[in-house]
Amino acid sequence: MATGLLQRDISLQRLNTFGLPARAARLAAIETPEQLIALMALSEWRTWPRFILGGGSNLVLTGDFNGLVLHVRIPGRQLIAEDAEAWYVLAGAGENWHNFVIWTLDSGWPGLENLALIPGTVGAAPIQNIGAYGLEMAERFQQLEAVDLDTGESVVFDRAACAFGYRDSRFKGEAAGRYLVTNVTFRLPKCWQPLTRYADVARELEAREISQPTARQIAEAVIAVRSHKLPDPARIGNAGSFFKNPVVDAATFAQLAERYLDIPRYPQLDGTLKLAAGWLIERCGWKGRSLGAAGVYEQQALVLVNRGGARGEEVLRLAQAIQASVRAEFGVELEVEPVVL
Ligand code: EPU
């Protein structure tokens, strides 16, 4: 019975990597699409506000949730096709992202190595189009399958239909909350090319005296860089980068560059420039500082951390103070990256 899936008054503290306290009135662990369909048949379904939870690694909980949390736990991973150009690998939305990446590498299908050690699940990866060290998930994406929570239909989205952008997709915008991703298929090209232009990774490989790295070696370098710069959520609560890197037009950038000669910039194809939010925040003096139990990580100012016992409101207060500083100093708006509930 679908009602058997429902748990009541559940703590979400261990289900979000920030470790923020909050309770859900109801929670259902979804292990198969059929379980979801059964839940949707309940007469109360339409009356419950709902929230889709994956690994909880891109989430700021600001209070209790008086609705139904759908905790996606759908397992499975397999090679579903292979042609002259690529391997096509499917994974259940509930699979741990990093374990999935390592499994593809162990299986001899390179292509996701730059995205090693990103926390969270496979199903969450397309929602914010995870990216790191010169690669975005969208570049390896083939399609996803999702259940439309309004109609119960299963829908397939190809890359164009997902409208991927920088840490963005249609599932964060117009279709937010409507679709529950059940599985994702990746296309891993056989003509593999190492992506090592990102300075941190290049430096790490050089230190290891590796000039022609294998995918495995790139994953190891990425893991080393991430472990050094980013806090392990198992030990220090956090949600990765707390803000997106802001994008400004050329005229705005020219004014900034006059005042700040060393300001990092990443020119985009459309003539705009992406700035490094971590640099802006550090220049405002926030690196390593705290407000209450919420803090700015010592090694990477773009990451806010839970110093122990923080509440979501405290994290947001710190975020607002940082936004105000960056606005006052640089005239630049920082956009919060994780989902705030
Ligand atoms: N920087 C500083 N001070 C800091 C942090 C960064 O000056 O405290 C400077 C760095 O020296 C560098 C620039 O800012 O010149 C960029 O820093 P970094 O290479 O660490 O990357 P990032 O732009 O801060 C982004 C992603 C990360 C991803 C890394 C590597 C976003 C919002 N963040 O961070 O993604 O791992 O690049 O590709 O785009 C995440 O999304 O959760 C995440 C961790």
Image (spheres, rainbow, N blue to C red):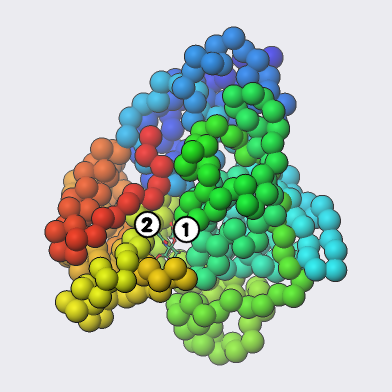
Q: Is residue 292 above or below residue 269?
A: above
Q: Is mark 1 within 8 Å of ligand 1?
A: yes
Residue with the mark numbered 1: 166
Q: Residue at x 84, y 61 (%)?
A: 82
Other residues around mark 2 within 10 Å, as few (<14) / some (14–19) / many (≥20): many
User: Is 260 situated left or right of 19 in this image?
Assistant: left
Could you tell me which secondary element the residue under label 1 belongs to? loop
Return the x and y of residue 71 as percentages of the image width and height: 56, 33
Comparing marks 1 and 2, which lies closer to the viewer? 1
Residue 171 appears left or right of 85: left
Residue 222 in picture, x, y percent from top left: 53, 71
Quarter of the figure with residue 65: top left
For ligand 1, give the image quadrant: bottom left
Residue count near mark 1 (Cα–Cα under 10 Å), binned few <14, some 14–19, many ≥20:
few
Location of the N terminus (image quadrant): top right
Q: Amino acid at mark 1?
A: Tyr
Mark 2 = which residue? 244
Compared to residue 161, the image places residue 288 above or below, namely below
